[in-house]
Amino acid sequence: MLKKRELNGHECYVLFELMTHPDVFPFVRQKAHSFEEFMFMTKQTIEAEERGEIISRTILDEWENPIGTISLYDIKDQAGFLGTWIGKPYHGKGYNNLAKEAFFQELFYEKDILTVFMRIRQKNVRSRKAAEKLPYTVKANDSRSLIFQQLNTVEYIYDLYEIPKDLFTMNFMRQSSEQAELQPLEA
């Protein structure tokens, strides 16, 4: 489902083609206007991860084809901002939630991250609805007012959402116990 970003020509080409779709491109944080620029930005992303500034993964479908990316940017004080995009042909098929679950598990249980923030444009209805469906997401415009104000210095553009490790863990444990209860007992 997820793998470390690579400077692989075929993978980068597929991701670039998916990213430039008009329904995807406006909501991508790291926009590349050419394939060469995308390769350069991927190289920069890999180097930034080596320095601990970012955590970035390629999202794969069930056949291990690249379909998007998920990243944690601006890492500071065990927190960072989530950036995710998935190619248009894969919208509405559940990949976003699967990718986020896997990524959050890595962040919280392997990378020592305590809080993931999501900055979502008010007009990006698809992303806002997806964020609000997650049972471990909290709208943080009021509770994290300083960060909210920093995101909206001139005008109200972004809503702020927060995913705290403890809330994600509580939900993860509840899901695990519910799944265990559904498993048939062996005779």
Image (tube, rainbow, N blue to C red):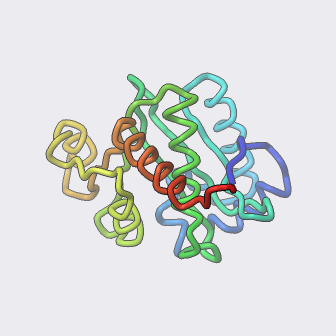
Q: Position of residue 176 (x, y in %)?
A: 50, 49
The C terminus lies in which quarter of the figure? bottom right
Q: Quadrant of residue 65?
A: bottom right
Question: Eyeballing the image, is 34 above or below 146?
Answer: below
Q: Position of residue 178 (x, y in %)?
A: 46, 56
The residue located at (72%, 38%) in the rendering is 43
Q: Count numbered badges in the picture.
A: 0
Q: Quadrant of residue 135?
A: bottom left
Q: Is residue 9 left or right of residue 145?
A: right
Residue sitting nearer the eye, 75 or 137: 137
As drawn, which residue projects farthest toward the front?
Answer: 187
The N terminus lies in which quarter of the figure? bottom right
Q: Is residue 165 left or right of residue 48?
A: left
The residue located at (32%, 62%) in the rendering is 132
Question: Eyeballing the image, is 6 above or below 183?
Answer: above
Does any portion of residue 22 appear in the rendered image?
no
Q: Position of residue 96 (x, y in %)?
A: 54, 62
Q: Position of residue 71 (x, y in %)?
A: 55, 44
The residue located at (65%, 45%) in the rendering is 57
The residue located at (39%, 36%) in the rendering is 165
